[in-house]
Amino acid sequence: MKTANKSTYLDEKQKELSFSGAFYGRKGDDIFTGSHGYANWSDKIANQVNTRFSIASGCKIFTATAICMLIEEGKLTVDSKLSDCVDIEFPHFNSEITIHQLLTHTSGVPDYFNEDVMEDYEELWEKRPAYNVRSPKDFLPLFQHELMQAEPGSSFQYNNSGYILLGLIIEHVAKVSFSEFVEERIFKKADMQDCGYFEMDQLPPRTALGYIENATGTWKTNIYSLPAKGGPDGGAYTTVADIAKFWDALTTKKLLSEEMTANLLKPREVVDEDGLIYYGYCGYMKVDNQHNVVKYIQMGYDPGVNFRAVYVPKEEATIVVCSNKSDGAFAMLKEIEGVLELTI
């Protein structure tokens, strides 16, 4: 299929899938971009390739990269204990929790969004004003005095609270706010000019609102469904191209040394029955039967937010899909994988 035909195919797929967002796909010299739907439905402002979207948990990798920077500077180690890294009281937490365990979701700390207890992230803010949540410490009332949900070093259990704690560690060690550290040390270094931890009531130009479908088939924005400002566990805003720039900067060692980059990208915890999906400091990854990573995976889900991205090292291919609805990114990503003819 010729490049022009591939672009037409992806344009048609966006319409067929009722996709609302933007995408970027690159393999070698082949680059495909596109957008569909509206960033603001009321005013019919169209999504563009350079529209900024929230990516929910897709930015946990930024938190992990920041921690690795501090480790490289000798200010932390992966074995550093939470109790030694922050001056905050956690009455029921095990004193042996380490940074490695927080990074790999094996710390056992209570998750403030426990999907076994609640199905919808919106439920968190029914009794707590989300507009007051604008820094990592603002999340503490959600889990600080709760009991441990497992022993440190136990099996993988996805945990947002662990990444809030990593953000608090960054602030304590670096002596700056979490968002300032990431924006200065990661976004600027990687030339990610459109990225930021923006506040929902002070969004910059070219930023999409998120939309949630009601039971009646109507739509509402997600402004009352998420914290006012994202943090270490998710909620940064980005363009699709800026995520590609991040992977370029990371894999060309502009952010971390070769050794630390390898540590960040290494498979750590197996998370599926087939033993082919792992979690590492950088997030999810798929491995082959020889335990070589064939694909790195970023994903993010929030009410009115859907994000997927993959980096395929063997083919140096990158795909990024941002949606300002609660779904759609994965389906679009699979279409782009097919168009790029990735062998994964």
Image (cartoon, grey):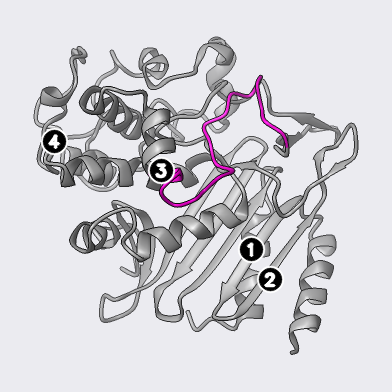
**Disc 1 designates what residue?**
24
In the rendered structure, does residue 196 fall within the stretch colored magenta?
yes
Sequence-earlier tag: 3 or 2: 2
Amino acid marked by disc 2? Phe
Instruction: Tell me the distance, in whole angstroms, between the alpha carbons under discs 1 and 4.
Output: 36 Å
Amino acid marked by disc 4? Lys
Which is nearer the eye, 80 or 125? Answer: 80
Instruction: Tell me the distance, in whole angstroms, between the alpha carbons under discs 4 and 3.
Output: 20 Å
Sequence-earlier tag: 1 or 4: 1
Residue range (magenta): 186-205
- Residue 123 occupies which quadrant of the picture? top right
- Residue 163 occupies which quadrant of the picture? top left
Amino acid marked by disc 1? Tyr
In percent of width and height, residue 293 lies at: 33, 72
For mark 4, give the secondary structure.
Answer: loop
- Residue 232 occupies which quadrant of the picture? top left
For mark 2, give the secondary structure.
Answer: strand
Residue 60: give its label: 3
Residue 32: give its label: 2
